[in-house]
Image (cartoon, grey):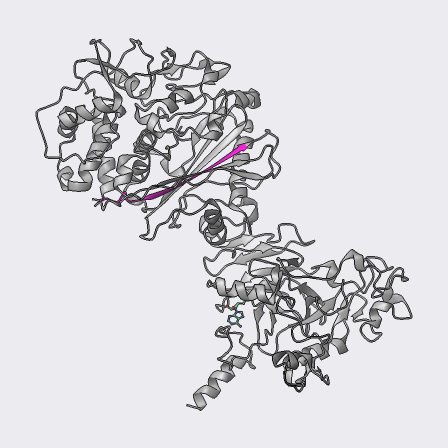
Amino acid sequence: MAPSAKFVKAYKAMRTLGYTQQIVKPVLKNLLVVYNQNWQHIEDSNYSALVEAILDSEEFKEKEQQKFHLVDEPEEDEPPLKRSRLRSQTCSSPGDSSPSSNGTKGTKIQPQMPYYQGEADISASNSSPGSKPKKKTQVLAHHKSDKLEPLSPGTHLIDDGDTYTSGSIVPRMIKERCEHTVSLEEKNVVCDSILSNQKNMLIKSYSDAPGEVELLPDDPSEFEIPLSLVPPDNKKFLIEGDSSNAKEQFSTSPVVINLDAEDTHGSSSEMDSLVRGNCLEYECSDATKGENSSSNSSQIDIASSSSGEVKLSIIFESSLPSNFRVPSVDAVLRHLEENLLKSYRIIQPGLPVINLMKDICEGFLAAATNTTDDEAVNCTDVHCNPISPKELDAQHVLNGNVNHQVGFCVSPNTSMGPIQVQSPVDIRPQIPKFQSLNCLDLSHYKIDVTMKGSYGDSNKNIVALGDLKSSASSSMMIIQKQHFRHDMLSSTYYIDDITRGEEDLEISLINEFNNDHQPMFKYIPKNVTYQSAYVKFLLARISDDNCCSNCFGDCLSSEIPCACAGETGGEFAYMPGGIVKEKLLEDCIMMNRNPQQKNLFYCQECPLERSKDKNLSGTCKGHLVRKFIKECWYKCGCTKDCGNRVVQRGITRRLQVFMTPEGKGWGLRTLEDLPKGAFICEYVGEIVTNMELFERNSLNTGKKHTYPVLLDADWCTEGVLKDEEALCLDATFYGNIARFVNHRCDDANLVEIPVEVETPDHHYYHLAFFTTRNVDALEELTWDYGIDFSDHNHPVKAFKCSCGSQFCRDKKALKSRRSRG
Ligand SMILES: C[S@@+](CC[C@H](N)C(=O)[O-])C[C@H]1O[C@@H](n2cnc3c(N)ncnc32)[C@H](O)[C@@H]1O
């Protein structure tokens, strides 16, 4: 039996035997210690005897006394159940004679269960079911007396305008919690700067004993931080307040909800809540998932305050690798964005994690302000008891478990705003890892996001929290529901617009072949300069005579070619309708297919060759003279509809990114029939200098999504560009759909043509794709990357080509290699 299952079993058995959570909790903790060391003893144990033995043991009592500074009180007749709960979940003021726990009177069984030295967190409870109260203890605390009001199950408790439907209420004060070092709860409290600043925070808590009431504050405004709660029947939890008045209720009635979808059933939720609310938080979070769950899990806790702040905690649990190092917040976010989002089923392209978290918070606000009572009871658990980064549970430490808490504060109101990292990752001291036998060897990543905001309508993407059994890394699935068409197979992965509205047309992405999700990159519709690249089309150069400032209307309809056409020999590149003229198209295709027939320009004193060796004059090896297009632009006198403006208007054809069945990865296809010479898209990416690209490539050892396009190295006839000036396009991190165009040898249906829009100096141009022939709807769009598959010395190792072309150069190279032996 898996240790976690045993743990659950032990818990259930103890609860069945009638032990209160407050007894079970410390006992389980002790049990865990034993368990780690000698778990086979547990297998056949009589749990009743076990509990009694633990409670009766001298070590247990001693530790409990030390830890909680318990003061013996005169015996008082109180039902043990209630007393124990009061003892462990409430804090009494000095001199408070409210009921407290009795001592333990256990059996004489003393199992050989070594207590692990250093184990620190032991509950204050030491009562035993059915036992006669032996003594009363009092927790020394420093706060004013709390008012106690009993409720029966289902009773509506009106407090400060709030309505509670059932259960117990355990409000706490943050000050008290931060000052205290006496209880398990205190140990777990983070005096978080975010939460601690909140006023009027009140917690609704539900015990496992319906009708049992804990503390109710005289002044709820004193309660600033929520504590852990247990729902009465594992299902019943509500956001208090009636729906008619939900907004006001919400603003004055903070709630704390655990939305862990996996904890919705059975007593596991109860236990999970119980233990998470205390020091055993993570162990039991895992334990409750029992045998069925993987060792990895996650949960989301969301809390809101009366001031409109929503705090989101995401706890991600996974096995600690041996090279574990605490990363920076930036590193975590970057890593998530680059690598992990897809495993969480987050389909939004380039979605920053922080935005996702903010969306969740906003969704919570929106839901909270629109939720009816009926809907509200779906929440499964009530919990917010953040673990103090400074005070780790000893068991965690011993198990080498680490809790990283990261706080983020998302700026006010629902519009996007700057994000402040409020509390950076807490760096754990170097704790020797305890090699335990059990399966609770988890690391815990807890990311808190806090959003203060107005409660305006949110039309943000839907966030669904559910069970993602197929995912190895998380039980959380976050999807954009609206992006799934109903007629699709459940296995189809589909996004309706990967451009996020950046293009005039939506461009969908579909995968019907495997489980790959959209690669991480940021969609940009136009090139952006990365850093050092200097692109010369400044407004200061508006006086340059490279435009047709005297034109008006549509230049194409003018009888005399305009100045822009003069740049390309007095000929416009386009026909009406934006189709590239046949001659230009064929020239460009030819130049690509037959490099040996490239149009070369030879200079007399080649600056390029001279730059290689200053002492030699150097014979010019020829510079490529590329055919190009010069478009009119906004410096010109023509209108935006001018027929000589095509590429700058962006994508106009219906296209789709799809998963290719041939193993080439993603590809681009057309969803409509295309004529020959039609503009498809520009190759968009980051404009980087040669130097920057080199640095990137040497840093980035991971797989590349794109082939950087060298913009002007073989085209510039104006002199030799230094590496820090020569421009390249890299679409690895920022790009458009062109980054998905796959290679096809020789007979690709796309050809790239340089297009000048803003600058005439050939230093920078747009690389535009046009169709080389008529293309049918659903055909894949391909481009000949120009790779020489026989060049094995090339620094970039070519992929194994599966273009399927009869002219495939890779296959030819392979054949000739084979024939050479
Ligand atoms: C610009 S990306 C094209 C999009 C890419 N398929 C993806 O999934 O992101 C270039 C990469 O696609 C793959 N690829 C492109 N054309 C290919 C071909 N003909 N055969 C095999 N793989 C190809 C190679 O992995 C190459 O490095």
Secondary structure mostly taken by the magenta-highlighted segment of the chain = strand
Q: Percent from the top left, x then y, of residue 182?
A: 30, 23
Residue 588 appears in the figure: yes
**Location of residue 412 by image quarter:** top right
Residue 779 shows in the view: no
Q: Which residues are magenta?
A: 438-451
The residue furthest front is: 615
Q: Residue at x 70, y 71 (%)?
A: 753
Where residue 109 appears, as percent x and y from the top left, is 8, 28
- At 60% from the left edge and 29% from the top edge, which residue is drawn? 454
> Does residue 64 appear left or right of residue 580 in this picture?
left
The quadrant the N terminus occupies is top left
Residue at the location (51% across, 84% down)?
A: 812
Q: Quadrant of residue 392?
A: top left
Residue 232 on the magenta segment: no
Quadrant location, the C terminus: bottom left
Q: Is residue 128 above or below residue 758?
A: above
Foreground pick, 149 / 798: 798
Q: Between residue 622 and residue 620, name the one nearer to us.
A: 620
* x, y percent for residue 820: 44, 91
Left/right placement of residue 497 relative to residue 295 reads: right
Q: Is residue 442 magenta?
A: yes
Number of numbered callouts drawn? 0
Q: Quadrant of the rendered structure where residue 772 is?
A: bottom right
Q: Which residue is farthest bottom?
A: 820
Q: Position of residue 213 (x, y in %)?
A: 35, 15
